[in-house]
Image: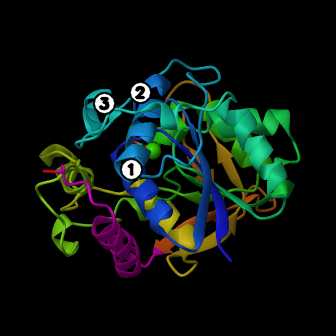
Amino acid sequence: MSRPVLIDTDPGCDDAVALLHALERPDLEVVGLSTVHGNAPVAETTENARRILELVGRTDVPVARGADRPLLVDLETAEHIHGEGGIQGDLPEPTAATRPIDVHGARFIVEQARAHTGDLVLAAIGPLTNVALALAMEPALPDLLDELVFMGGAAFTRGNVTPLAEANVHSDPHAAKRVVRDARPTVVGLDVTRRATLPPERIDGLPRDDPLGRSIDAWLTYYGPEDLERNRIDAAALHDALVLAAVADDRVLETDPYPLEVGADDGLARGALVADADGVTGREPNGRVAVAADYERFRALVGGSLERLVERVDVSVPE
Ligand code: BDR
Ligand code: CA
């Protein structure tokens, strides 16, 4: 039986790899995408999500456009990392087939959680605004889900937008605070995602002369030289893809329970996800944090999905 998963996303190069992997897994059923501001404004992340679905011929997957700004702080986007419009690659224009449904992304999350009571995995790989809004609409959301997993935070490592904060949590710290307090999440942060790389040479038969091959190549290598140097890695970090690899295979990540909190006040601690490792707060664990990853398993899983995809999708232009 396949595992239903709803992906809340802000594509984004690493989001794109995560989506391709999830869509290609026979053991996952992607019930839809909700989009959110993040790597670009939501109009663009929504368009990017649609273009990715068009690229791989999955226009059957519903797209629900979500929040266009964080709950309280100003919108910040990351085109300087992901490219103009928030994504790189060679993507088709969206058609009417992927027009967003007439439901807000947050409401779509609630509806899908109710429709798949107890079974749905909510994988959030952008700022947590939609998830926090969904929680406000339906406080029982955590009980309706099988699991809520999000890419965010830097619990035991340095941040990527400030010394303490990772981008998804920093972009909407109030939303992240609400989710961490109330939704018992599994948190997959920079502790493990920074080393989740997949050099394109690892993909057998990756075509270099068609839109799908060119897009995959661009997404696996979206970091510029400075990003690589700062992160001390030799290929781009596929943060979000690690989350969807772990949803497909529970041997990818090791997680431990911790009392968790998010700093939301302006200043150095904005967006810091804090795990109380020694129990000094005396609080009970309210979530889990990924503390180790099997990167070879990650590469085999995601690489395998991409290989199957390029074999399946014929994007060659007819003569
Ligand atoms: C996260 O921020 C975004 O830029 C990526 O898509 C990922 O979700 C990494 O900090
Ligand atoms: Ca993302």
The residue lying at 54 percent from left, 33 percent from top is 36
Judge the density around disc 3: few (<14), some (14-19), many (≥20) Cα neighbours within 10 Å.
some
Res 278 visible: no
Looking at the image, residue 209 lies above or below residue 1:
above
Q: Name the residue under label 3.
A: 79
Residue on which disc 2 sits? 44
Pinpoint residue 75: horizontal percent, then vertical percent: 49, 21
Q: Which of the 4 image quarters holds residue 269?
A: top right
Magenta stretch encompasses residue 299: yes
Would residue 186 appear left or right of 145 to someone viewing this image? left
Q: Which of marks 3 and 1 is nearer the N terminus?
A: 1
- Disc 3 C-beta below 8 A from ligand 1: no
Q: Residue beneath label 1, please? A: 16
Q: Is mark 1 within 8 Å of ligand 1?
A: no
25 drawn magenta: no
Residue at the (18%, 49%) spot, across then down: 317
Instruction: Tell me the chief SS of the magenta region.
Output: helix
Ligand 1's quadrant: top left
Q: Are marks 3 and 2 in contact (CB under 8 Å)?
A: no
Element carrying mark 3: helix
Which span is picked out in magenta?
Answer: 293-318
Mark 1 vs mark 2: which is more N-terminal? 1
Residues at marks 3 and 2, CA–CA distance in whole angstroms: 11 Å
For the residue marked with disc 1, what is the amino acid? Ala
- Estimate the spatial distance between the alpha carbons at disc 3 and disc 1, rounded to whole Å: 15 Å
Nearer mark to the viewer, of 3 and 1: 1
318 over 299 or under it: above or below: above
Mark 2 residue's CB less than 8 Å from ligand 2: no
Residue 187's x, y, as percent?
59, 57
Q: Residue 263, how many percent across, how many down?
A: 61, 37
Res. 313 in view:
yes
Looking at the rendered structure, the kind of residue marked 2 is Glu
